[in-house]
Amino acid sequence: MKERGYDAVRIDAYPHLLAADPAGQWTLKPEWDQQTWGAPGIIRLCNLQGNLIEFLALCRQRGILVGLSSWYREDLDNTRMKLAAPEDLARIWVRVLDAVAEAGLMDTVLYVDLCNEYPRDSWAKFLRNDPAAPRTDKEFSRSSEVAVRWMNRAIDLVRAEYPDMDYTFSQDGEYDSTESQDVSRLDFLEPHLWMTSCTDFCRRIDFRYDRFAPDSFQRLALHGKETYEEQPEVWDDCLRKGVANLAQWSRRTGKPLITTECWSLVDFKDGPMLEWDWIKHLCEVGVTQAVSEGCWAAIATSNFCGPQFVGMWRDIAWHQRLTQMIKNGNFTQPAE
């Protein structure tokens, strides 16, 4: 990471599991087996608190800050569903920060994202426990009474214990309704945005985000690059407009932006006919636009920056060029 120019990383702190048993052992069910995120299969975790503290200490030694988040992965006991109220969500995060504070490592934590891509069912399933939750399969919106109440109450309670930390709930959509969203408690906005968020690209190649079947990746290999290269300027421009729209939201609310998942496609990986050149180009388009807007306090170069994405990771010069571009940019705190 340091060699490639990165100075921050976002991780899953597993707060629901750490708070339940900080030194215990947990078996997580697979969320997918086609994507390369996390572990594409069953996985066992142990000694979460000890490993978190060790990781933070190693990051501090290397001058790397850490954003704490959680995907609330399902374990065999489905511990995440024991979160019955926003007070429970706050309690588990206070427990994590207590452990960090006791280890003297609070200066290594960049922020706390209380739930990844909130309030998606995949990660915020616990919202279904709320007595006011609708008894349907429909996803919550960011503006729903339940989602807003949990978000605001949880941040208020954690902030009461750790007032100097920055807090947010990241998201991956609803960018056409930002004016109706209550972001008053958020210290910054953490939108995840891709070219595919702004276009019908996935529909054109029939990419369906299959988690346990290879069909979508096969269609992506066959048609993804050629579809992009038929009109690259159109796809690039749609991404630029999406980034600019987020910058307008930032200026309107006075909230800075941090984006940690972004720019090209949501899903990609190494494989036959899955070439990285057009993916890296799209990521550069997104980074360039975000830097030019001046509203981003932190910017990821893509959501394929882990070493498991070999085709992306091995291009050290590409990472260095984009991270230097980010560091050379001028960030201006938005004024509401």
Image (cartoon, rainbow, N blue to C red):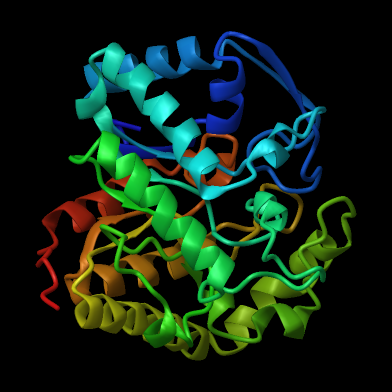
Asked if residue 162 is positioned above or below residue 269 in the image, the reply reads: above
- Percent across and percent down for residue 131 are 69, 59
- Percent across and percent down for residue 78 are 77, 34
Asked if residue 94 is positioned above or below residue 273 in the image, the reply reads: above
Name the residue at 45% across, 58% down: 151
- Percent across and percent down for residue 149 are 48, 63
- Percent across and percent down for residue 11 are 47, 36
Which residue of the protein is positioned furthest toward the front in this rendering? 131
Asked if residue 54 is positioned above or below residue 12 in the image, the reply reads: above
Q: Nearer the viewer, residue 129 or 13?
A: 129
Name the residue at 51% across, 70% down: 194
Asked if residue 51 is positioned above or below residue 288 in the image, the reply reads: above
Q: Number of numbered discs present?
A: 0
- Left or right: 95, with 197 as reference point: left
- Left or right: 331, with 15 as reference point: left
- Left or right: 46, with 55 as reference point: right
- Left or right: 328, with 78 as reference point: left
Name the residue at 66% across, 56% down: 130
